[in-house]
């Protein structure tokens, strides 16, 4: 009796067709750079309940979305279900021009990535190189800088920021395939805690673009100029939406099982703090890893990169679902063994650091410190090679900063001081600091 009354009044529980419609609509609006809020009978939908529903029913979000599009549910939404773009809270209300600028950044990014990653303009070798290089160039300098700023190590952080500026100049000068996504990644690494540093670096990126990119209509230059004028209140959601443009293009170009697609989705999920999709992406990554292992072997660089992405995705899934983090340990051990066999020092270092973070979360502090020292030892061995120093330095500084913080928290102040001295020895004062120049780059460089 009560079920008939609820149906008559329009009160319904989650239904597979409704969830499929919501996911299809959300994907379409996401591609347009719009955020979405769903309402059922005028009441906001709690997305955590939708996540619980998907897990309980063991439904694949991607398959459900595809089925909804194929069956036309995207255009035949139930009358009680509606969607809208959420309004910002009163404290964040701004002029409509600010949101138009945000939409312009997303549109320019879509134009840039479509033009830059046009298969008709790329050779087979270039396409393969794009796939291997991944969807995002991770700014290790930005991550190291963020860690040192958080630890209040401001002097070495300033030196690392100048290194970041020089790396940024190099990327813009040669316009690598993922230079814009690298800049987005830098912003997400530094925000929201250090938004002033991020906006300062954006201004320098604009200056570099004006020096090395002559055309004012170049999509990269236009995107950077628009990003420089983006209001801080909408900077992060704008960047996340722009990053999603890369993710969609990479998936279209290489397929959902490709290494570039898996890595770009992982970066997007971490930035957007997504609570769904990890399990289905892990399945795709495992499928891609097995295919590469059969074709190229377990010690191939791409197979190892798949393992690294799998470890990262399994960590995020455990964190989001609140499950046991020890489930990540077998994957890290698999990564470590394959990386040691291949002699891939970045993967070996990352595996040891991964063990350290998991042990730390599990309360095994001594094991965490031992694993972090193992990561540092691997990086120091690579640092002895002059050709690798530029790549190794930010990793090594970042590991030292994390270990110093752990030692201080454990009351081991003498050991923490020793670690700090080792880190500072890696970042001697540069010419600008000695001369008393506070800027990030020389005037003749940034124009």
Image (cartoon, helix red, strand yellow):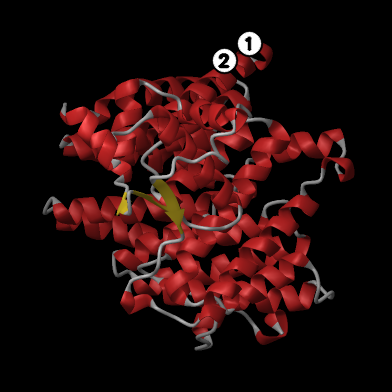
Give how far across and how far down residue 412 sits, in percent. Answer: 14, 52
For label 1, the crowd category at 10 Å Cα-Cα, with few meaning under 14, some 14 to 19 and many 20 or more, is few
- Point out residue 349 in the picture as x, y percentages from the top left corner: 44, 37
Label 2 SS: helix
Looking at the image, residue 446 lies above or below residue 80: below
Q: Could you tell me which residue is drawn at 53 percent across and 87 percent down? A: 437
Q: Is residue 361 above or below residue 181?
A: above
- x and y percentages locating residue 388 in the rendered image: 60, 47
Of residues 296 and 107, the one nearer the viewer is 107
Q: Is residue 256 above or below residue 157?
A: above
> Which of these two is toward me, 220 or 42?
42
Give the class, few, some or many, for how many residues have Cα within 10 Å of label 2's Cα (few <14, many ≥20): some
The quadrant of the image that shows the C terminus is bottom right
In this figure, what is the number of numbered marks? 2
Check contact, mark 1 vs mark 2: CB within 8 A.
Answer: yes
Q: Is residue 185 visible?
A: no
Q: Is residue 430 above or below residue 285?
A: below
Residue at 26 percent across and 42 percent down: it is 9
Q: Is residue 237 visible?
A: yes
Cα–Cα gap, marks 1 and 2: 6 Å
Q: Is 364 left or right of 190, judged from the image as shown?
A: left
Taking the spot 52% from the left edge, 32% from the top edge, the residue there is 65
Q: Is residue 441 left or right of residue 327?
A: right
Q: What residue sits right under mark 2 in the picture?
A: 290
Q: Quadrant of residue 225?
A: bottom right
On the image, numbered disc 1 is attached to which residue? 294
Instruction: Give left or right: position of 363 versus 100.
Output: left
For this view, does 215 lie left or right of residue 245? Answer: right
Image disc number at residue 350: none
Numbered disc 1: secondary structure: helix
Q: Position of residue 218 (x, y in %)?
A: 80, 68
Of all residues, the one furthest to the top in this rendering is 294
């Amino acid at each position: 009796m009560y079920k008939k009354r609820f149906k008559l009044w329009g009160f319904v529980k989650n239904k597979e067709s409704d969830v499929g419609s919501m996911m299809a609509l959300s994907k379409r609006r996401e591609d347009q750079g719009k955020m979405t809020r769903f309402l059922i009978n005028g009441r906001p939908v709690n997305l955590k309940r939708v996540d619980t529903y998907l897990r309980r029913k063991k439904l694949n979000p991607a398959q459900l979305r595809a089925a909804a599009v194929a069956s036309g549910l995207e255009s035949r939404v139930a009358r009680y279900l509606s969607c809208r773009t959420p309004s910002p809270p009163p404290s964040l209300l701004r002029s409509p021009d600010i949101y138009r600028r945000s939409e312009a950044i997303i549109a320019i990014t879509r134009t840039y990535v479509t033009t830059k990653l046009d298969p008709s303009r790329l050779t087979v070798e270039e396409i393969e190189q794009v796939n291997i290089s991944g969807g995002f160039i991770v700014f290790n300098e930005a991550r190291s800088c963020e860690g040192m700023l958080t630890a209040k190590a401001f002097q070495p952080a300033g030196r690392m920021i100048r290194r970041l500026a020089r790396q940024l100049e190099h990327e813009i000068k040669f316009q690598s395939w993922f230079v814009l996504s690298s800049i987005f990644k830098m912003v997400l690494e530094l925000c929201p805690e250090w938004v002033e540093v991020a906006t300062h670096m954006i201004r320098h990126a604009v200056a570099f673009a004006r020096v090395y990119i002559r055309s004012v209509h170049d999509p990269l230059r236009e995107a950077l100029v628009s990003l420089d004028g983006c209001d801080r209140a909408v900077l992060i959601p704008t960047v996340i939406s722009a990053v999603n443009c890369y993710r969609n293009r990479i998936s279209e170009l290489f397929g959902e099982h490709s290494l570039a697609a898996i890595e770009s989705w992982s970066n997007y999920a971490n930035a957007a703090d997504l609570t769904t999709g990890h399990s289905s992406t892990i399945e795709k990554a495992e499928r891609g890893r097995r295919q590469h292992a059969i074709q190229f072997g377990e010690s191939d660089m791409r197979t190892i990169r798949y393992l690294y992405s799998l470890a990262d995705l399994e960590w995020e899934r455990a964190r989001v679902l609140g499950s046991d983090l020890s489930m990540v340990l077998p994957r890290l051990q698999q990564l470590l063994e394959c990386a040691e066999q291949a002699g891939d020092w970045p993967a070996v270092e990352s595996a040891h650091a991964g063990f350290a973070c998991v042990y730390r979360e599990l309360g095994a502090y001594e094991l965490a410190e031992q694993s972090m020292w193992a990561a540092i030892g691997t990086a120091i061995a690579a640092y002895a090679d002059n050709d690798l120093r530029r790549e190794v330095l930010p990793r090594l500084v970042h590991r030292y900063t994390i270990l110093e913080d752990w030692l201080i928290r454990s009351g081991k102040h003498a050991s923490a001081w020793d670690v700090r001295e080792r880190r500072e020895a890696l970042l001697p004062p540069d010419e600008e600091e000695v001369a008393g120049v506070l800027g990030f780059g020389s005037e003749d460089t940034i124009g």
